[in-house]
Image (cartoon, rainbow, N blue to C red):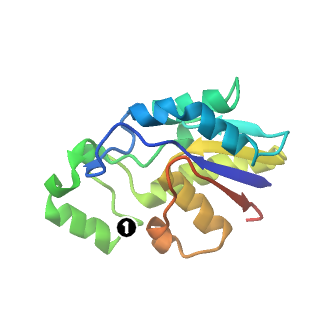
Amino acid sequence: MHIFLIRHPQPAIASSVCYGQTDINLSDDSLLNLGTLAQSLQKQLPNNFLLYSSPLIRCRTFAEILQADPVYDERLKEMHFGQWEMQPWSGIPRQQLDCWAADSLHYVIPGGESVTQMQKRVLDFINEKQKQHTENLALVTHAGVMKILFAQAKKLPMNNCMNLHFDYGSLHQIEWNV
């Protein structure tokens, strides 16, 4: 299965704020450039692809420009940061951040989820699409989802996946043979 991972454009929030599943719109600059970005990415996509998107508005807005009828799936949402959502990273209790850093895969953020829990829902989605014999799958999603899928496809250690970086509005292709 060919998977085209597309990160949503820049949201309207400071990079110093933790915002995972909070539903935040795109920045004004991103909104102004959606058509141009979509045209550029469409040239990199095959003619016959299924488009799925996170239902969060920063993905949904862009997905609807790429294709008239994208399908939304909750499993493609960003990590749920629970009590950390909408908090400045500097305001999150140091002890919690240290616990997360010590076991980033399994630490469950208060009121949220762990990377392992997120990985399960994302892989459930991909495995479902694979069983349906999907050939070309495009996903408008978030950096966290992309990191998990990229690491899994490239057989990278999962505990290092959060170190991967994907620019806003970027497209990355992976082959899913897992």
Q: Nearer the viewer, residue 50 or 121?
A: 50
- Image quadrant of residue 140? top right
Image position of 103 with respect to 108: above or below: below
Residue 11, position as x, y percentages in the image:
40, 39
Residue type of the residue flagged with mark 1: Ser
Residue sitting nearer the eye, 169 or 157 = 169
Residue 49 screen position, x and y as percent: 79, 40
Please state, as top left, top right, bottom left or bottom right, where the N terminus lies in the image.
bottom right
Q: Say above or below: 22 vs 164.
A: above
Q: How many numbered callouts?
A: 1
- Residue 23 percent coordinates (x, y): 39, 32
Q: Residues within 10 Å of mark 1 (few under 14, many from 20)?
A: some
Q: Residue at x 76, y 44 (%)?
A: 43
Query: Residue 79, percent across and down?
Result: 42, 49
Query: At x 62% / y 27%, what residue is drawn?
Result: 64
Say which element carries label 1. Answer: loop
Give the quarter of the figure containing the C terminus. Answer: bottom right
Image vertical order of residue 91 relative to residue 159, above or below: above
Residue lying at the far top in this picture: please name it.
Answer: 68
Res 48 visible:
yes
In this orientation, does residue 56 appear? Answer: no
Residue at the image position 70 percent from the left and 37 percent from the top: 51
Residue ID at (40%, 31%): 28
Q: Is residue 107 left or right of residue 33?
A: left
Query: Is residue 172 toward the left or the right of residue 141 in the image?
Result: right
Q: Mark 1 points at which residue?
A: 104
